[in-house]
Image: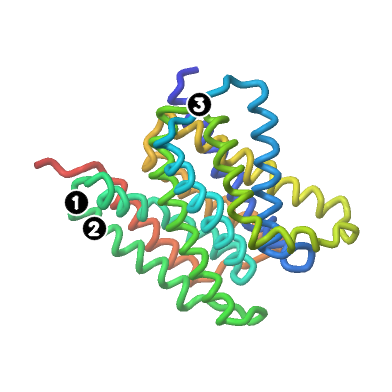
Amino acid sequence: MNNRLLAIIAALSATSIFGLNHTITKSLMPFFITPSALLFARVLGACALFWVLSIFSKHEKIETKDWSKFLFCTVFGMSVNMISAIKGLELSTPINSSIISTISPIIVFIISIIIIKEKVVKTRIIGVAIGFVGAISIILINSRADINTEDIRSGNVLLLLNSISYAIYLVSVRSLTIKYSVITIMKWLFLFGVILNAPFSIQQFLDVQWHIYDKVEFLKLSFVIIGATFAVYLLNIYALKTLKASTVGMFIYLQPIIGIIYAVYTGSDRLKLTDILSMTLVFIGIYLVSLKKEAN
């Protein structure tokens, strides 16, 4: 099996796991655990797992000039990205979270124009505009009778911030994957993540009433830490060593399909006409952005 196929399988597996995560994470908050406590549990658990794995891998020395890149990736990949996703999901719905996450590939394209000066193509600009309208539609017009509308809108804005932050992380971490192994990158990013997030979340983590958890809640929390954090970040970094950031970002398109099916199946959310229309706009935008460059 060649490296490209393995990378594709890794990216597909990562997005499938995260598609389930929207509903599972939502079910834990806020009764069992607060967003800040869950954030710290994720980075601490993943950090421990990656450092244990590093015992069995080759030691690599980080060049001094690269530490700033590690810190930058940590801010957007293990801090802003995670807390905005978790808090946004608490206020919003699993289906909104699944749909808004698909805006990341469009943001990756915009960042690529700014940072790596990718050529501007008319169809891609139109795609960005259509996708943006779809995302804004979800944020502004989505509501549910059993949830405060303002909470949903605030949650959707945070979910959009999560997509922007993750896109920045995805583009930025690519340069590190060329020089260092997957385990080396992840162990340092998550260690920085623990240090960076501790002042804002460690107290909430220590205040968690673990005795109210039953076996099901512990299994859900284990899935969020081991599956949706450790495995997803590991698989995505592995995929980035072979595939471009924009290619890995394309697999995010599957998240709403998996997330919506699971959310509806478990009764955690319901699909509405506005969801379908907004998702259609986002997918049209994604399709246009992903088209190959026009010939000169």
Tag 3: Cα neighbours inside 10 Å, few (<14), some, or many (≥20)? few
Mark 2 or 1, nearer chain start: 1
- Image: 47 above or below 109: above
- Image: 188 above or below 148: above
Gap in angstroms between the C-alphas marked 1 and 3:
38 Å
- Give, as a three-letter code, the residue at label 1: Val
- Image: 231 above or below 89: above
Gap in angstroms between the C-alphas marked 2 and 3:
41 Å
User: Is mark 2 in CB contact (under 8 Å) with mark 1?
Assistant: yes
- Give, as a three-letter code, the residue at label 3: Lys
Mark 1 or 3, nearer chain start: 3
Q: 120 or 40: nearer the eye?
A: 40
Element class at badge 1: loop
Residue 227 falls in which quadrant of the image? top right
Query: Which residue is located at x 70 percent, y 44 percent?
Result: 45
Mark 2 or 3, nearer chain start: 3
From the viewer's perspective, tell me whether residue 117 is left or right of residue 57: left
- The residue wearing badge 1 is 120
The residue sitting at the top extreme is 1
Gap in angstroms between the C-alphas marked 2 and 1:
7 Å
- The residue wearing badge 2 is 125
Residue 231 screen position, x and y as percent:
62, 38
Query: Which residue is located at x 69 percent, y 36 percent?
Result: 49
Query: Which residue is located at x 53 percent, y 75 percent?
Result: 154
Q: Nearer the viewer, mark 1 or mark 3?
A: 3
- The residue wearing badge 3 is 61
Residue 175 screen position, x and y as percent:
38, 36
Q: How many numbered marks appear?
A: 3
The residue sitting at the left extreme is 296
Residue 92 screen position, x and y as percent:
59, 70
